[in-house]
Image (cartoon, rainbow, N blue to C red):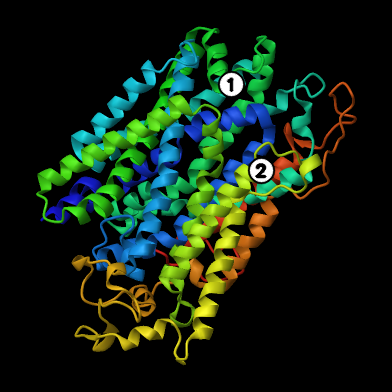
Amino acid sequence: PPEDSLPRHYLGGRSFGPVLTAGTMFASFFSGYTVVGVPNEAYRSGFLSLRWITSAAIVGLGFFGTAARLRKLSLVRNHQSPVDFISDRFRSQILRYTAVTFQIFPSIIYLTAQCTAIRTTFNSIFRLDPNNVGAVIGICLIILLFEFMGGLSCVALTDAVQGFIMVLCFIILPIVIKKNFGGWADLDLESYPRQDFYQTPTSSEQWLFWNFTIVNFCFFSLPHFLQRTYAAKSLGALKFGFNVVTLGPWLTMLTGTFIGTVGVQMLADAGIENPPSPFGAILTVLMDLGGFPYFVSCFSFTASLAAIMSTADSLLIAISHVLTAEVVYPIWPNASPRRVTIFGRIVSFLSISVALAISILGGKNLSDLAAIQFGLSLQLLPVFMIGLYAHKSTDCHPWALAAGSWLGFVTTFSLHYGYMKGFNPEIDGPPFNSGVMGCAVNVCVVFIIEAVRRLSSRKKDTAVQEEDETEMFVDERDDKVHPSMKPREHQPEWDMPHISRFGDVALTPDLVWKCMEGVREPFAESWFGVLMFVLTLLVTPLVGADTPPLNEDGTLAFAPSVVRGIPSWAMSIIGFTALMTLIFFWGKFGFGLLLCVRPFRCY
């Protein structure tokens, strides 16, 4: 059947072992934002770029808390598409296609960013015209060819190779820089060109740092990550992949901060000011040394392209998967497997064409889209968390969740373009992360709509118990009565997804929890959520602003507090983020590092 061809092409037949799962997750997660973006940001913003490490830890937290349930339910309920869980759990076309929109739109922005990173990095290294587009078009065609040749299996294999290249790069490159130019401890603060990097962050920077830490929590809901959750052969393979992703930021993002901050001195000594791509300019300086540094620079350039390409091909096949499964297949449910494959390739071609067009023609508007990308993904957080962890009494109507998501979407756009664009904290007042504020509005709207709906109902039962009015089904496996796959009370027929592969029994909160019986999970423990919230506050540098102050000539009024060349406030970020990472591993392996509480058996 056509629907059986989808998991073979888009999920690799659910056959990824530990090494392949880890390789493809690592290469897909640590993208051009990591290899090129973090050094570039560190060059311009200094140690505040450590926010990527703390945010990556929160990404790991989201994955840590949801992957086991999502994968288990995908096997029990035959979920094949990244949107299938939402379709099955809430049985609403409105919410289903709301989720499709909020998965596709951020993914297109993400793919566009990869195309831009390819163009800027390639043109910078080879000293081409910054507006040259020939290279990026050629590389995108290669990415498209990978997806055409073998689906996710081919993409995952290339990801594993590209991930290995990235690991070698992030090990060798900082060593070469340290040997030839020194490290953090070797920087002379009196002559360092950007002494403001050693000042404590302003209050606005601290607030936005915390907001950025949490805005990526819903990264697990992006379709290319959900694909890998479903494609893992076993929970052991998924566990191994999670371990690699958890350790990855310390190898990639911390190294990126080192490259960018030390690169300030390197480029200043070379007489290079404000390069369009600082990372590319740093590699060029290394190339000028010749010998082994020249080789490492070429290898690092290869690694940067590998990182960008691995994320781009992962996003491409994920976009194709969602649109094929949720748009093309429902329109042509009786299409042959060959025709479904052709449709998927057409979708892939159109997706990368759109991303290329936006990248080439978007100009400054692209940075605005990239700034709200993860904030848009965050609008699906209430949907997934309620779907995975709600009980009967706390379940919500899908239309309330859809309304909250769309109003959060509008809030994110409105705040960014109407308030934060061109923002000046000295004039405009307190800053906001548009995605976090949008999610706050989202949650409030869901709460208000659900409360009004329940209060206006004359029935004494809760919203979830309304399902008892529908036709019931007796499951012979547990002799319990469950709601059948029928519309909810007052739900129009057109809002009911007609997907037979989920089975005859509705996926209720009770069944979700029943699937996870015997497994202690972090998000099921209230104290764990409180602990993680406290840690996200502690990783934020809550210190007095602008200390030491700057003199009129841009030098520091007095020596800052540093530890091995790193500002003490930045060292506290590293320390508390490391503690968060250790807690993750304690939960995985039972190290017993905290409070003598029994470790979680999540996998």
Residue type highlighted by circle 2: Met
Neighbour tally class for label 1: few under 14, some 14-19, many 20 plus, Cα within 10 Å = many
**Alpha carbon of mark 1 to alpha carbon of mark 2: how far?**
25 Å
User: Which residue is tagged 1?
Assistant: 278
In which quadrant is the C terminus drawn?
A: bottom left
Residue type highlighted by circle 1: Pro
User: Which residue is tagged 2?
Assistant: 420
The quarter of the picture where residue 569 lies is top right
Q: Are marks 1 and 2 in contact (CB under 8 Å)?
A: no
Against 65, is 540 above or below? above
Task: Look at the numbered disc 2 and give the secondary structure of its residue.
Answer: helix
In which quadrant is the N terminus drawn?
A: bottom left
* Residue at 72 percent of width and 46 percent of height: 206
Q: Nearer the viewer, residue 482 or 560?
A: 482
Q: Is residue 5 left or right of residue 231?
A: left
Q: Nearer the viewer, residue 457 or 137?
A: 457
